[in-house]
Image (spheres, rainbow, N blue to C red):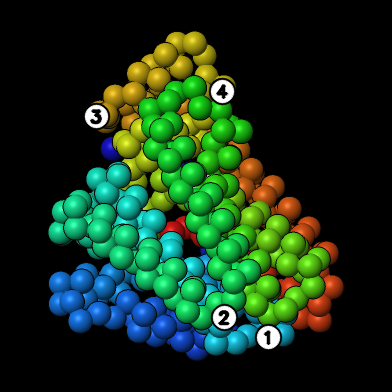
């Protein structure tokens, strides 16, 4: 039973944003399917299962929009979008194993259906296939940049796992974790696409900064939706982060603002693996009392504004409106 009723105002439909590039995203989907296709019946069964739970495809969309802005959307851009999405999917498969998650994107996870051992190996398969596609279709400088990005993502995932149930996690530490585990892939999606398009260095750097900003905002909003989102929209159980011992920004704000008595009880709740209805009600009351959701959304807006500032440095002839609409969607989304 939950008593928190706060909602993110505004509603932006992702389909409306991606409609102009829908055919390009379909090409990305086809490239993913072709690349993951295998004669191994068991692996193909899991590949087909994964294809039924496609996500928002934000990273390929950013790559396509960046290429269009730079005036050079090529077959390499499609391969880049496919590789980015497969890399992302591989991290999600591994996350679900670590978190012991049963639901992802409104369907049962691989580990729920096939167990942890097979799921880890399947995540490795998708990860390796992503880099196979990169090595086959993309130039060395782009592959090198994506390899560096992957290294950072792994570092962020390790830091997040290491800090589970760490009631002393600070806001700067949290922000560094989400930068590494989430935002850098958004940044790389824009950056490497611009590199493929032969853009000037200032454009490449500006698009990287844009991607990093909206990536930070995306993860912060994701963490607020863990408390205020609707399970059918979010696609997984709410408050799952809290149950798994992950300290996200709303909880950190409560700990920063709470009294000694409140903090003592809150820390006790966080460190317990099993949370009661009374525990969740108590946390909800603190989220409201200290406006932790509102403050978190404000932090996300800060990163979106910084991302928009980066767009002002772009000197190309392309339209910036699609980027701005994407940034606004990430703030107002409810899934």
Please, is residue 269 above or below residue 177 in the view? above
Q: Circle 1 sits on which residue?
A: 72
Q: What's the CA distance linking mark 1 and mark 2?
A: 9 Å
Instruction: Tell me if mark 4 has few (under 14), some (14-19) or many (20+) residues whose alpha carbon lies within 10 angstroms of its own.
Output: some
> Which secondary structure, mark 1?
loop
Estimate the x, y position of residue 294 in percent, counting from the top left.
58, 40
Q: In terms of sequence position, does the residue under pointer 2 or pointer 4 come before the other?
A: 2
Q: What's the CA distance linking mark 1 and mark 3?
A: 52 Å
Q: In terms of sequence position, does the residue under pointer 3 or pointer 4 come before the other?
A: 4
Front residue of 181 and 41: 41
Q: Nearer the viewer, mark 4 or mark 1?
A: 1
Estimate the x, y position of residue 2 in percent, counting from the top left.
34, 38
Q: What's the CA distance linking mark 2 and mark 4?
A: 44 Å
Residue 329's disc number: none
Q: Circle 3 sits on which residue?
A: 274
- Residue at 43% from the left image edge and 26% from the top image edge: 166
Q: Residue 7: tell me if it is visible.
A: no
Please, is residue 243 above or below residue 75 in the view? above
Q: Circle 4 sits on which residue?
A: 256
- Residue at 53% from the left image edge and 60% from the top image edge: 147
Total marks placed? 4
Q: Circle 2 sits on which residue?
A: 77
């Amino acid at each position: 039973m939950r008593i928190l009723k706060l909602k993110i105002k505004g509603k932006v439909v992702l389909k409306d944003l991606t409609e102009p590039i829908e055919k390009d995203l379909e090409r990305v989907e086809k490239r993913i399917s072709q690349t993951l296709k295998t004669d191994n019946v068991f692996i193909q069964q899991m590949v087909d299962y994964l294809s039924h739970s496609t996500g928002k495809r934000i990273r390929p969309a950013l790559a396509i929009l960046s290429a269009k802005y730079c005036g050079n959307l090529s077959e390499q851009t499609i391969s880049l979008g496919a590789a980015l999405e497969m890399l992302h999917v591989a991290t999600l498969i591994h996350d679900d194993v670590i978190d012991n998650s049963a639901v992802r994107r409104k369907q049962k996870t691989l580990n729920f259906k096939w167990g942890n051992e097979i799921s880890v190996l399947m995540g490795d398969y998708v990860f390796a296939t992503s880099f196979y596609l990169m090595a086959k279709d993309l130039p060395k400088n782009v592959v090198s940049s994506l390899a560096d990005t992957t290294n950072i993502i792994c570092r962020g995932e390790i830091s997040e796992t290491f800090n589970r149930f760490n009631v002393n996690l600070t806001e700067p530490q949290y922000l560094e974790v989400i930068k590494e585990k989430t935002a850098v892939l958004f940044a790389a999606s824009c950056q490497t696409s611009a590199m493929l398009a032969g853009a000037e260095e200032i454009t490449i750097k500006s698009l990287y900064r844009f991607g990093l900003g909206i990536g930070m905002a995306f993860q912060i909003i994701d963490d607020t939706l863990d408390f205020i989102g609707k399970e059918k929209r979010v696609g997984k159980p709410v408050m799952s982060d809290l149950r798994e011992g992950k300290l996200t920004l709303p909880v950190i704000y409560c700990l920063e603002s709470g009294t000694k008595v409140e903090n003592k009880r809150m820390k006790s709740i966080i460190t317990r693996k099993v949370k009661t209805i009374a525990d969740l009600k108590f946390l909800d009351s603190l989220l409201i009392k200290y406006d932790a959701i509102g403050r978190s959304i404000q932090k996300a807006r800060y990163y979106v504004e910084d991302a928009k500032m980066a767009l002002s440095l772009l000197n190309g002839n392309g339209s910036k409106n699609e980027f701005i609409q994407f940034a606004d969607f990430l703030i107002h989304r409810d899934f």
